[in-house]
Amino acid sequence: MPPKPQTYPKLSQLDLSKAIEAHGRMLAKQANGKRLALPFHTLERLTFGAKPLAEIELVGARIAEADFAGANLARANFFGADLTRANMRGCDLTRADMRGVLLRGANLEGAHMPQVDLRDGFLIVPDENGDFDFAKATQRAANIDDASFARANMTDAKIARAFGRRTDLTNCILRNANLAGADFSYSDLSGVVLSGADLTDANLSHCLLQGAVLAGALLHNTNLEGADLTAAQFTKKDFERTDVSKAILPRGLDTLDLPVREIVERHFLWLQSGGQKGAQAVLDAVDLSGFDAPGVNFSAARFKRATLIDANLAGAKFQMADLTGANLAGANLANADLRGATLDRCILNGADLSNADLGPMPLPTTATGRWPARMRGAQLRRADLRGAKLVEADLSESMFQRADFRDADLSSAKFVDTDLTGADLRDAKIDDADFRGAVGRK
C-alpha cells in the first residue's frame, strides 16, 4: 500500500488564543505558563495579534495568511514554515530563524529584523505516524517573491541564496547583510541601504536601485543588467569587480546639450516670460553632486532621480518643482522655498532643511486654492528641520529617525506610517497633524 500523506494537526482560533495566553504567562514568569510550540501544525488564516510572542516554535507549520501584525517575534523559530501572504507588518523579528520559509506575497513593511536568518534549510517532515525520516530531508531556499519589506530594518541579516523576485525592499536597511547568491531580479530596492552588504553573485538584474546606498557594498560578479542606478550612491571603486555596462547609470554633465549655467539662465527666462521664452530646466537622472548654487531659482524645474549629494542650495527656490526620487543626501537646503514641491521617495539623509518652507503653494485654480508639498516615502534620517514649515505637507511612509524638528511648524501635516524613532519634536507645532500608524514618536 502507498504511504499515507503526512498530516498537520489543525488548531482553532480559540485554542490558539489559549496557547498565546499561556506563552505570555511563560514570558512573564507567571504560573501555568507554557511556550507556544506548534511544529508542523496548520494555523492558516488565524490571528496571533500584536502580542508578546518571543521565542515561539512554529517549525514547518502552515501559517499562510495568518495575522501577526505588530507582534514581538524576537528569536522566534519559523524554520521551514509556510508564511505565504502572512501579515507581519511592524513585527519585531530580531534574530528570528526563518530559514527555508515561504514568504511569497507576505507583508513585512516596517518590520524590525536585525540578524534575521532567511537562508535556505533542510526540512524533515513527519509521516502519518508523527515520526521523522531523516533520510528524506528536503532542501528548500527561503522564498520571498512578491513580498513587501518596505522600510524594514534588516541590518546584519543572512539572506544568502534566497529567492526574492519582484520583492518590495524600498527604503529597507540591509547594512552588512549577507546577500551572496540571492535573487532579487525585477525587485524595487529604491532607497535601500546596502553599505557593507555582501552581494557576491547576487542577481539584481532589472531592479530599481534609485537612491540606493551601494557605497562600501561587496559587488563581486553581481548581475546588474538593466538595473536602474540613477540617484544611487556609489563610487567607481565599488564596481571594480562587477560589470555595470548594461546597467542604467546617472547621466554625466557631458551628456547635457548646454552647460548647467546656461540651463539655469534659460529656465529663469522661461519663468519670467510665463513659458514664452527660454526653456524649462529638465535635469532628470543627471549627476549634480556637489552642485554649488545658493539662491538659484529652479521653481517648476524637473529633477526626477537626479543626484544632488552634498549640493549647496541654501535659499534656493524650488516652488512646484518635481524632485521625485532625487538624492539630496547631505545637501544644504537651509531657508529654501519648496512650497508645493514633489519630493516623493527623495533621499535627504543628513540634509540641512532648517527654516525651509515646505508648506502649500497658493494655487487659485485648485479646489482648495492651495497645493501642498509632498514627501511620501522619503528618507530624512538625521535631517535638520529646525524651524522648517511643513504645514499640510504629506510626509506619509517617510523615515525621520533622529531628525530634528525643533520649532518646526507641522500643522495639519500627514505623518501616516512614518518612523520618528529618535526624532526631536520639542517645541514643534503639531496642531491637527496626522500621526496614524507612526512609530517612535515621543
Image: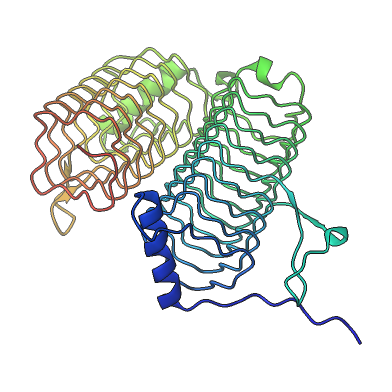
Residue nearest the viewer, comparing 114 with 261? 114
Asked whether residue 29 appears in the rendered view, the answer is yes
Q: Residue at x 61, y 76 (%)?
A: 9
Picture quarter with the C terminus: top left
Q: Residue at x 14, y 30 (%)?
A: 408
Is residue 380 rendered to the left or right of residue 66? left
Q: Residue at x 34, y 31 (%)?
A: 380
Residue nearest the viewer, comparing 14 with 272? 14
Asked whether residue 70 appears in the rendered view, the answer is no
Residue 109 drawn above or below residue 48: above
Residue nearest the viewer, comparing 238 with 393? 238
Q: Quadrant of residue 67?
A: bottom left
Q: Exactly how many numbered labels are in the figure?
A: 0
Residue 264 drawn above or below residue 271: above
Q: Position of residue 213 (x, y in %)?
A: 53, 28
Q: Quadrant of residue 200?
A: top right
Q: Residue at x 28, y 27 (%)?
A: 403
Q: Which residue extends farthest front? A: 31
Q: Position of residue 410 (x, y in %)?
A: 15, 38
Is residue 296 rendered to the left or right of residue 3? left
Is residue 305 rendered to the left or right of residue 369? right
Q: How is the image coloured?
A: rainbow
Q: Position of residue 130 (x, y in %)?
A: 72, 71
Q: Position of residue 288 (x, y in %)?
A: 48, 20
Q: Which residue extends farthest right? A: 1
Is residue 156 rendered to the left or right of residue 226? left
Picture quarter with the N terminus: bottom right
